[in-house]
Amino acid sequence: MNELTTTSSQPVIILGGGINGAALARELVLNDVPVVVVDKADIASGTTAYSSRLIHGGLRYLEYGEFSLVRESLEERRRLLGLAPQFVRPLELFIPVGRRGGGWLAAPMRFLRGRSSAKHRERGLWLIRAGLWMYDGYARDPGLPRHNVVRVGGPESLPIDPERYRWLCSYWDAQITYPERFVVALLDDARSLSVEKGVPFELLTYHEARLVEGHVEIHRTGAADSQPVARIEPAAIVNATGAWVDRTLGQLGAGSQRLIGGTKGSHFLTFNRSLHEALDGRAVYAEAEDGRPVFVLPLGDAVLVGTTDIPFEGDPSEAVASDQEVDYLLEVVQRLMPQVRLTRDDIHMHYAGIRPLPYCDESIPGAITRRHWMEEHTDCHVPLYSIIGGKLTTCRSLAQNAVHTILSRLGETPLTDSRDRFIPGGEAYPSSAEELAAEWDHLAQQSGLPRSSVQAIWSLYGTRCRTLLPSLGDASQKCIADTDLPVAMARWVIRHEWVNRLEDLVERRLMLLYQRQLSVECLGELAQLLVEAGKLAVSDVDAHVAATIDRLQRHFGIRF
């Protein structure tokens, strides 16, 4: 699964297996272009995994005049709701408002000059409604309701502090539960297209690339003095490493001015029942005291709270939510819903990621453009591009535009695009909650698995469960410790989804990082499955489990 088998053709090499790299790989293979994806770690292990998990048009972008980005994002939101319903679902958000006026001076300042006035003033009802009218106008989505305003304390209201807020402005966007699984699905689709079309496609995780006079050497990550596992003469190279773009260019020896000025965004996850019940499947989009937007979002039976926006200069791999950031987010929730009495003891885990924003000398973080583009590096022996910016919502349109740019440079034209192509598992999706529940019952009866196991697998694969469950074999075997996932499911994932390490399984394939309990016993069982698959030596099991526990404690604050 992780050895290069085809180097005879001239592929496009994509560096980075995150959301943009995966979407681009799929789009290229769809257009009959050979592809090799190389990631120095695991797929979706960077910024992709550490966002607010929203598919949104960017309501706040309107204040900065990013109208074309809002239009593009809303169009892609509509597509994803239809083409990836197993991952992307409509979400109603409420903006708490405490005054009618306010923010009228600051908004034009942001629009005209890309920055705020020195002193933050809370946005008032009239300004927010004006923005929501524009948002509805750009969306033109008959599948989602238009915005609305309700009184705090009324029958349609969330239990927001009535002494601080008078109204709630309701609008609709969408949420992506597992962007990590979305990336796996994109790459799996690229692999399926590769077989169907006879177009070479390879994915190498825990490898890195070096540019040597017109060809690329592929080495195992960290094996600096080793012989390359492959030498490739590429048609083009795309640097899709996100927050690592500048570091990657340095490793390739490609001279460039600084391109990325990343900012750190931190979140925490809580299983506090009172907060979860207060949201009742809806979300809050509030302002912190300094004007930063903070989301309080339902995520399964948990609640996700984020985010911060802090300039970051270190290694993105080492980004961790600080105590100050966690306290900052906690204070927002306490101010919104004091009756919940959320404390640090309620925080189950936290995470932090670095946004791959364009470098900008003089700007507040929130004002930096969220647009994306391809930066061409003209001083190399081979066509080399870097993807600047980008977000979950626009990954498909970014990929489509990138394919046009790459093929134009190579003297070719695109054959097709993915605008109407389902994400695997989104085809023939149940059209109502009742149909979905009936399908879960049917699959449970058919497979012999508990309904809870069917639901857990469905959350990872959607309608692919119809063909996947029969392939798992004996459904009577036990589940992995403290999970609803059958052992056979984990075996299948290890065999088919580019798994190399325990953290790949826990964080980005089985999504156990986001469940209420993650036990040492569970980690031990998964490690034994890696041994069984030839991915891990028996003698290394204890050390591998210990290293994974250490990572989960340091990076995410998980307690064992």
Image (cartoon, helix red, strand yellow):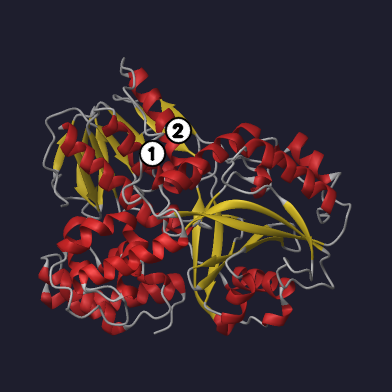
**Which residue carries the number 2 mark?**
256
**For the C terminus, which image quadrant?**
bottom left
Residue 506 percent across, percent down from the top left: 32, 69
Compared with residue 547, is residue 251 higher up or lower down, i.e. above or below?
above
CB under 8 Å between discs 1 and 2 = yes
Residue nearest the viewer, comparing 547 with 344: 344
In the picture of the structure, the residue carrying the numbered disc 1 is 249
Q: In the image, what residue occupies the spot 19% across and 56% down?
A: 496
Task: State which quadrant residue 293 falls in.
Answer: bottom right
Q: Looking at the picture, which amino acid does disc 2 mark?
A: Ser
Q: Distance between the residues labelled 1 and 2?
A: 7 Å
Sooner in the amino-acid sequence: mark 1 or mark 2: 1
Residue 345 spot, x, y in % from top left: 56, 84
* Viewer-nearest residue: 511 or 48: 511
Q: Which residue is drawn at 32% across and 58% down?
A: 461
Rendered position, 540 above or below 313? below
Instruction: Name the side, left or right, on which 555 lies relative to 6.
Output: right
Label at residue 70: none
